């Protein structure tokens, strides 16, 4: 069953309570499979020219109304704090945003543990010195549709004054929708209460809309703080954008070093990710990959770790279990539902193959890790500090995430076993950070308000 068919099966318009016609469609609309797309980074030199461009781009951004219907391509627009300042927003509005957003991702390197080869000084130019003011993201089902929407956006940019294109990056994956390492990704997505969709099996209950949409009630029973005025903040959300260069060959070499044959290598890789390459979770298929299970949207997420308390099936330190402990007993307690995120990650570069080695790691493969949340900055900094770059919450000391953790010195990966656990040494940084930014994704009405310079009238 296709993604959209599965979605429509679970949708009932009578359950909709959100203002879908004011929410950017990208927030609720998952990428198609297969997918292609482009990210574009813009810099504003002239406030009036920048506002004019935002106003015209607003007409090309679809809302979430009808988000379960087929759409060949769509665009989303997000703004950094430096971008909002460059557009001339008043100080009281700028100061109403969360402190982390005001400071920007580079300035939060210590909180994000972006050190060594991941420190901001090493990032690509488009992400340095608060250069990224506006981020345009286009997702499409085909190259033809991508070019159509891209042409519309570029036509608006060509007419703009005082706005520079800092960089673009195309991305895409075939119908298997696998990441650079050959694993199907973005399977686990939260269901947003009020969007009209019943959760898939395994998705647990729907999460309060205010965890993703500003102005709606959160898991705590009230909205999280949002920027002012109301027209600016309501129905918007926050976005974390992090671009990674994936060292796929080095990962392959690591598996070869510790696996005597391809079967052993695939088993170790599954232990590190928490799923087999098809997307089948270890806890539902512990001994071998199951492509039918991996492709079954009604089953491939229908599990938790409550029956695997010792991590004998899926190690506690596996990437997927770290990022969504679902039912695990954690040493450092936290409400897992307020750390749920809507993923919009996008893969770029050649498709994975088993014969790649470290010599093939030339920086042309990677992943844009993009997620949406009303608590985005608290969440990413928590994830980076605790769940990714530390192991205390799992009683594993300083052991880091084997896939996205920063390993300035070779680390280890622990696999619980009987009678004694195994430790695999030599884990290195398989995903190097090349840049990123904290962004705000305004509502449709807020884009128009910014475009009109609403605060300047009267």
Image (cartoon, rainbow, N blue to C red):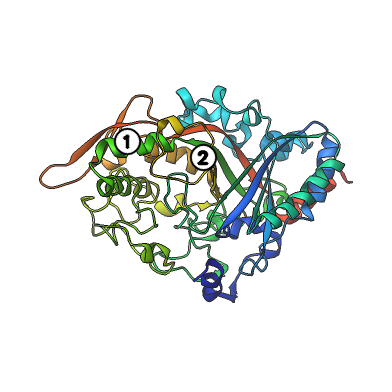
Q: Can I make out residue 83 in this image?
A: yes
Q: Residue furthest right?
A: 458
- Report the residue at 45% width, 49% height from top: 339
- Residue that mark 1 sits on: 254
Using the image as rendered, state which of residue 288 and residue 382 is in the foreground: 288
Indicate the quadrant where residue 392 lies.
top left
Could you tell which of marks 1 and 2 lies nearer the N-terminus? 1
Residue 44, how many percent across, how many down?
77, 34
- CA separation in Å, label 1 and label 2: 18 Å
Q: Residue furthest left?
A: 419
Callout 2 secondary element: strand
Residue 286, how many percent across, how many down?
25, 57
Callout 1 secondary element: helix
Count all numbered tags in the image, as a single digit: 2
Tag 1 near tag 2, CB within 8 Å: no
Using the image as rendered, state which of residue 38 and residue 350 is in the foreground: 350
- Residue that mark 2 sits on: 366
- Report the residue at 32% width, 35% height from top: 254
Residue 63, how many percent across, how many down?
70, 61
Mark 1: few/some/many CA within 10 Å (<14, 14-19, 20+): many
- Report the residue at 33% width, 46% height from top: 333
Residue 75 is left or right of residue 268, and the answer is right
Residue 225 is left or right of residue 273, and the answer is right
Residue 9, how many percent across, how many down?
52, 76
């Amino acid at each position: 069953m296709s993604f959209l068919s599965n979605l429509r099966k679970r949708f009932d318009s009578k359950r909709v309570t959100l203002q879908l016609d004011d929410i950017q469609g990208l927030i609720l609309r998952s990428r198609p499979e297969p997918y292609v797309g482009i990210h574009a980074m813009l810099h504003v030199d002239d406030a009036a020219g920048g506002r004019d461009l935002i106003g015209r781009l607003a007409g090309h951004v679809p809302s979430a109304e009808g988000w379960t219907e087929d759409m060949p391509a769509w665009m989303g627009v997000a703004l950094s704090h430096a971008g909002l300042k460059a557009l001339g927003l008043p100080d009281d509005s700028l100061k109403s945003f969360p402190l982390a957003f005001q400071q920007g991702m580079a300035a939060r390197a210590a909180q994000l543990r972006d050190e060594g080869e991941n420190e901001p000084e090493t990032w690509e130019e488009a992400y340095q010195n608060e250069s990224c003011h506006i981020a345009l993201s286009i997702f499409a089902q085909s190259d033809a549709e991508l070019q159509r929407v891209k042409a519309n956006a570029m036509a608006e940019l060509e007419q703009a004054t005082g706005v520079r294109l800092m960089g673009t990056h195309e991305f895409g994956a075939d119908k298997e929708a696998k990441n650079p390492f050959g694993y199907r990704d973005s399977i686990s997505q939260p269901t947003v209460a009020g969007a009209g969709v019943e959760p898939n099996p395994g998705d647990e209950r729907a999460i309060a809309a205010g965890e993703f949409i500003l102005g709606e009630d959160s898991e705590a029973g009230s909205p999280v703080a949002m920027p002012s005025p109301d027209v600016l903040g309501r129905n918007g959300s926050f976005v974390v954008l992090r671009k990674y260069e994936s060292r796929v060959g080095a990962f392959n070499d690591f598996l070869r070093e510790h696996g005597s044959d391809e079967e052993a290598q695939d088993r170790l890789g599954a232990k590190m990710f928490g799923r087999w390459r098809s997307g089948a979770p270890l806890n539902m298929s512990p001994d071998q990959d199951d492509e039918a299970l991996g492709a079954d949207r009604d089953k491939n997420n229908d599990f938790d770790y409550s029956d695997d308390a010792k991590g004998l099936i899926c190690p506690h330190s596996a990437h997927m279990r770290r990022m969504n402990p679902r039912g695990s007993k954690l040493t450092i307690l936290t409400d897992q539902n307020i750390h749920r995120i809507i993923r919009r990650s996008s893969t770029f570069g050649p498709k994975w193959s088993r014969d790649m080695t470290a010599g093939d790691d030339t920086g042309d493969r990677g992943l844009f890790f993009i997620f949406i949340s009303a608590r985005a900055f608290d969440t990413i900094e928590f994830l980076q500090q605790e769940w990714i770059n530390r192991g205390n919450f799992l009683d594993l000391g300083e052991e880091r995430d084997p896939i996205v953790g920063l390993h300035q010195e070779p680390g280890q990966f622990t696999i619980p076993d009987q009678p004694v656990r195994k430790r695999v040494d030599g884990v290195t940084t398989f995903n190097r950070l090349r840049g990123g930014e904290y962004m705000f994704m305004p509502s449709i009405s807020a884009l128009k308000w910014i475009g009109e310079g609403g605060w300047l009238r009267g």
